[in-house]
Image (spheres, helix red, strand yellow):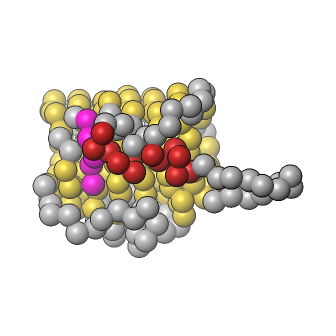
Amino acid sequence: YVVPNNNPCTYTNKQVNNTTAALTPGTYCGGLKISGTSTVTLSPGIYYIQNGDFTIANSANATGNGVTFLISGQNSNLNFTTSGTITMSPYTGSSAGQWAGMLFFWDQPSTNKGSTETFSNGTMTFSGIMYFVGQTLAITNSANIAVTTGSIIADMILPNKGHLNLTGTMNSPTAAQQAMKKKITSSTPTLVQ
């Protein structure tokens, strides 16, 4: 999968600080920052985060049911360092296409290959596929991460004074889940990426 990187900008350098807000799907050029004491609801759909970080910081809270984040371009990472609460589940609507079931997809051609996606401090509940190939996922500073149904695909998952709890199963046949399945024909162990 390759994230289109020439989407026209819906928002540029979008920031939500110390307020209650509802955000809508679109292309967030220069990233998206939710900070302060904000409480944000993310409407269902696909969010393109282009050439900038997706940050949730301070004591901000965010909820997104039925959301997919496609992250691409320069300086594009996840930095969830809030002491607040984040709850997100993937978009599975008919217009999701190949992205159905994906919560986060970090585009491999992005120039920050080898950098770190950070979940720190807060309480975060996710479901769906989190795809960070080429990246390290760091879970730090007493973060409590629960993945209720889904999977994490990353070069490394680094729990450093954080907690990761994986529960549930992946039984629904979304396009993303079907694409991730590998057929193993030998009886010997196989490394699959």
Residue 41 image point, x, y percent: 23, 31
What is the span of residues highlighted in magenta in the rendered image? Answer: 44-48
The residue lying toward the viewer, choosing from 18 and 70, is 70
Q: Quadrant of the C terminus?
A: bottom right
Looking at the image, how many numbered discs can be counted on the residues? 0
Query: Residue drawn at (68%, 52%), measured in percent from left and top?
Result: 183
Residue 85 image point, x, y percent: 37, 28
Query: Residue drawn at (21%, 45%), measured in percent from left and top?
Result: 25
Residue 148 image point, x, y percent: 53, 28
Q: Main secondary structure of the magenta part?
A: strand
Q: Would you say 154 lies left or right of 174 here?
A: right
Query: Is residue 47 part of the magenta span, yes or no?
Result: yes
Q: Would you say 105 lies left or right of 185 here?
A: left
Instruction: Tell me if residue 172 can be seen.
Output: yes
Instruction: Tell me if residue 78 can be seen.
Output: no
The residue lying toward the viewer, choosing from 4 and 49, is 4
The residue lying toward the viewer, choosing from 158 and 41, is 41
Tell me if residue 153 comes above or below residue 39 in the rendering: below
